[in-house]
C-alpha cells in the first residue's frame, strides 16, 4: 500500500537502525564521553609530567621562590603531595565517570546484589595504608633534613624577639668593649629604622631564637617555614642560603598591640660582601663602645 510504504520510509528516515525517531541520537553523549575521557586523562598526564620542566609560579603551586636549600626541599615535598593528590583524584574521578556512563540505570530491575567482595575490601584497606606510609616516609625524611643541626655552622646568629622589634647578635665576630661581646644589630618597629639581618650565601647559618617577653614567631617568607620564639625555651634551626636578595621578615604570632609593626629586613649577600659588612660593623661598634 502506498500509505504503508510512506510510513515505513518515514520511520526508517527517523532512525538509522529502523527504531523510533530520535533513538539514534540518544547514544551520542555517551559516545562523545567515551572519546574524550582517554584524551582528558592523557592531557592531565602530560601536564603533570611537564610540570617540573621549568620553575614557575604554577609549578610551585603558590609557594614563593625558595632562597635556601631547605626551602627547596619544602617546595619539592609540596609538589609531590599535589601530584599524589591529583593522581588519586584522576583514579577516583575516572571510576565515578565509568560507573555513570557504563553502569547507569537502564531498567527498573534491581541490580544483582553482592554482599561481600573480598579482593575489593582488601584493596580498600591496603592501598590507603601504602599511600599513608609513602607520605609519612617523605615527610619524615624532609623534616629530619630541615631540623638537622650540624655541630659547626659557618655563621651563628642569636635572634632576640621582644615587644615589638628584633635584635640580631653575631657572637663569633667579637667587638671588644661592647655589651653583647659581638657584632649586634638592633632597630625600631615600623615605620622606624628596621633591624637588619645580613647573612651570606652558600654558608650554613644557625639561628638561635630567644624571646625576652612573650611568644613571638620568626618568619622569613622565602625560607618556606617559620619557627616560634618562646620565653624560656630557645629554638634553633639552620639554613644554607643559595640566592642573594633583600626581603622582609616578620613576627607571625600575635604578641601585642604593635604586633603588625614587628618587622625586620633580611639581606642575603655574597660571602665577600658579608665579611665587608661584618668588618664595618666591628669597627663602628668598637668605636662606639670605646667612646662610651
Image (cartoon, helix red, strand yellow):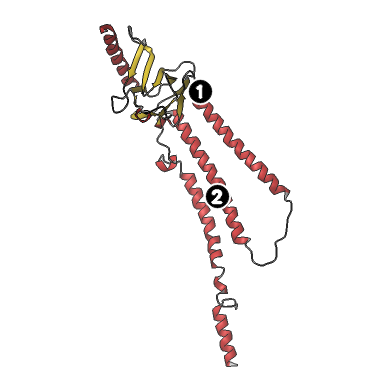
> For this rendering, which residue is in front, 225 or 201?
225
> For this rendering, which residue is in front, 254 or 7?
254
State the SS at label 2.
helix
Image location (x, y in percent) of residue 246: 33, 29
- The number of numbered discs placed on residues in the rendered structure image is 2
Residue 3 relative to residue 291: left or right: right
The relative height of residue 34 versus residue 174 in the rendered view (above or below) is below
| Quadrant the N terminus occupies | bottom right
Image location (x, y in percent) of residue 76: 48, 35
Residue marked by disc 2: 90
Which of the two labelled residues, at mark 2 and mark 1, occupies the earlier sequence position? Answer: 2
> For this rendering, which residue is in front, 201 or 266?
266
Q: Residues within 10 Å of mark 1 (few under 14, many from 20)?
A: few
Figure quadrant of residue 60: top left
Q: Residue furthest bottom?
A: 1
Image location (x, y in percent) of residue 216: 43, 25
> For this rendering, which residue is in front, 114 or 54?
114
Q: Residues within 10 Å of mark 2 (few under 14, many from 20)?
A: some
Q: Residue furthest front?
A: 257
Residue 65 relative to residue 20: left or right: left
Image location (x, y in percent) of residue 133: 61, 36
Residue marked by disc 1: 148
State the SS at label 1.
loop
Residue 276 relative to residue 6: left or right: left
Figure quadrant of residue 279: top left
Residue at position x 59%, y 61% in the image: 101
Residue at position x 53%, y 46% in the image: 86
Residue 104 numbered tag: none
Residue at position x 48%, y 18% in the image: 232
| Quadrant the C terminus occupies | top left
The relative height of residue 97 versus residue 245 in the rendered view (above or below) is below
Residue at position x 28%, y 12% in the image: 283
Amino acid at each position: 500500500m502506498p500509505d504503508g510504504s510512506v510510513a515505513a520510509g518515514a520511520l526508517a528516515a527517523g532512525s538509522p537502525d529502523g527504531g523510533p525517531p530520535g533513538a539514534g541520537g540518544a547514544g551520542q553523549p555517551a559516545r562523545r564521553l567515551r572519546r574524550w575521557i582517554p584524551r582528558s586523562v592523557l592531557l592531565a598526564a602530560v601536564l603533570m609530567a611537564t610540570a617540573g620542566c621549568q620553575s614557575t609560579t604554577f609549578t610551585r603551586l603558590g609557594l614563593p621562590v625558595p632562597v635556601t636549600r631547605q626551602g627547596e626541599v619544602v617546595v619539592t615535598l609540596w609538589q609531590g603531595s599535589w601530584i599524589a593528590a591529583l593522581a588519586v583524584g584522576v583514579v577516583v574521578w575516572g571510576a565515578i565517570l565509568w560507573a555513570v556512563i557504563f553502569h547507569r540505570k537502564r531498567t527498573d530491575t534491581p541490580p544483582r546484589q553482592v554482599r561481600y567482595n573480598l579482593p575489593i575490601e582488601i584493596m580498600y584497606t591496603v592501598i590507603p595504608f601504602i599511600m599513608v606510609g609513602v607520605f609519612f616516609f617523605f615527610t619524615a625524611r624532609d623534616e629530619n633534613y630541615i631540623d638537622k643541626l650540624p655541630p659547626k655552622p659557618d655563621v651563628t646568629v642569636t635572634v632576640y624577639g621582644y615587644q615589638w622589634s628584633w635584635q640580631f647578635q653575631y657572637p663569633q665576630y667579637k667587638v671588644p668593649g661592647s655589651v653583647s661581646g659581638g657584632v649586634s644589630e638592633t632597630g625600631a618597629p615600623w615605620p622606624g629604622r628596621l633591624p637588619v639581618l645580613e647573612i651570606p650565601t652558600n654558608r650554613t647559618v644557625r639561628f638561635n631564637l630567644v624571646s625576652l617577653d612573650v611568644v613571638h614567631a620568626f618568619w622569613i617568607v622565602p625560607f618556606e617555614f617559620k619557627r616560634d620564639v618562646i620565653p624560656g625555651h630557645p629554638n634553633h634551626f639552620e639554613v644554607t642560603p643559595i640566592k642573594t636578595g633583600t626581603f622582609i621578615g616578620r613576627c607571625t604570632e600575635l604578641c601585642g598591640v604593635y604586633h603588625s609593626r614587628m618587622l625586620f629586613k633580611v639581606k642575603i649577600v655574597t660571602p665577600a660582601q658579608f665579611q665587608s659588612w661584618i668588618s664595618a660593623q666591628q669597627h663602628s661598634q668598637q668605636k662606639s663602645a670605646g667612646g662610651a
